[in-house]
Image (cartoon, rainbow, N blue to C red):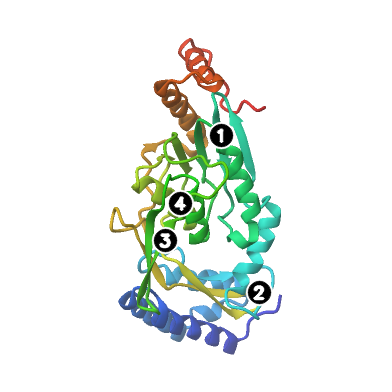
Amino acid sequence: MAQLQSAEITGIVTEVSRLTAGLYVFPEIGERIALGLDDALSKGRYHQSGDPETLGRLVTEDLQSVNGDGHLRLKFHPHAIPTEQEDGAVLAELARAADLSLGGVPRIERLEGGVALLKLAPILFPLDMTGDSLNAALGLVARAEALVLDLRECVGGDPYTVAHICGHLFDGPTHLSTIYDREEDAERQFWSPAPAPGPRFGGSKPLYVLISRATFSGGEALAYDLQQRGRAMVVGEASGGGANPRQGFTLHPHLEATIPTARSINPVSGGNWEGTGVIPDTATDPARAHETAHRAALAEIARLGGDTPSAEEARQALHGQADGHPTPPDARL
């Protein structure tokens, strides 16, 4: 990878400053950050970096120094960035990640007691990219008596995909969020769609969402929307705290400026999870969160009663735990 020349560094940082001042969703903070970049550039801070990776790290440190917005970055890409379309770097990364993660559904499992576990990672891909995989997975878990939705490694996603998933987890159209866009000075609402034909988990059976510090952006949006609507219990640790949707701008074959140009507004809380993360209803070590959620699901199934085989299995599983013989949480078919 070629070393950066002085003129290249000046041009890249100057453009990051311009984009931040002109597009960042919080104008006053954007102006303040841009002034800091200009000052650091004039003092030679960035000219110490001879390669794109180092420049990206230094500029990102300064971009996030004011309010810690994790979406505001000069992101280094080891693979060359496509320049023929907006957000080309993101789309190229998405295609690679989708192929490696079975369409963003790396794990589906039937746990003891009629509980299903569905893991979505590394992101919630756009529906036109992996919608078939997602729909197949949601259809499989629809028959479970309780669902554990694992978002501990979900670091982003498309808001339309978030709404689509929620369409399988509510019984009717539900207002999930509103996104304010600074450039358009307009708001756009996101609702879960009307229930589609076919098997759905629905809006009444027990639902648990697992999160960790790694959970970010679109993964957080799904957890937060379900939590604020009282649809799910969130288990784990506070998530990463990135609620401001971003745009990407290619400034070099290996450097992309990502600028948050919008902010999420939840209709229940009136706010979002920026900076604080999604706060779990049950705090626990993320490594043990699936066990905690599984036990809670078994207890809820037993409380609700019923005479299905899996409900009886749940009662037996809980009885075994009470006798000191816990059922393995990851019992596989």
Q: Is residue 77 visible?
A: no
Instruction: Identify the residue under disc 2.
Output: 81
How far apart marks 3 and 1 lie (CA) works out to 27 Å
Q: Nearer the viewer, mark 2 or mark 4?
A: 4
Q: CA distance from mark 1 to mark 4?
A: 21 Å
Return the disc, 1 or 4, that comes first in the chain's sequence. Answer: 1
Dot 4 amino acid type: Leu
- Tell me the residue that label 3 is attached to: 190
Amino acid type indicated by mark 1:
Arg
Which numbered disc covers residue 222? 4
Mark number displayed over residue 295: none
Q: Residue at position x 40%, y 70% from top?
A: 262
Q: CA distance from mark 2 to mark 4?
A: 29 Å
Discs 2, 4 touching: Cβ within 8 Å: no
234 relative to 221, above or below: above
| Residue on which the image places disc 1 | 143
- Residue 182 pos. (x, y %): 37, 76
Q: Quadrant of the N terminus?
A: bottom right
Residue 22 in the image, given as x and y percentages of width and height:
40, 83
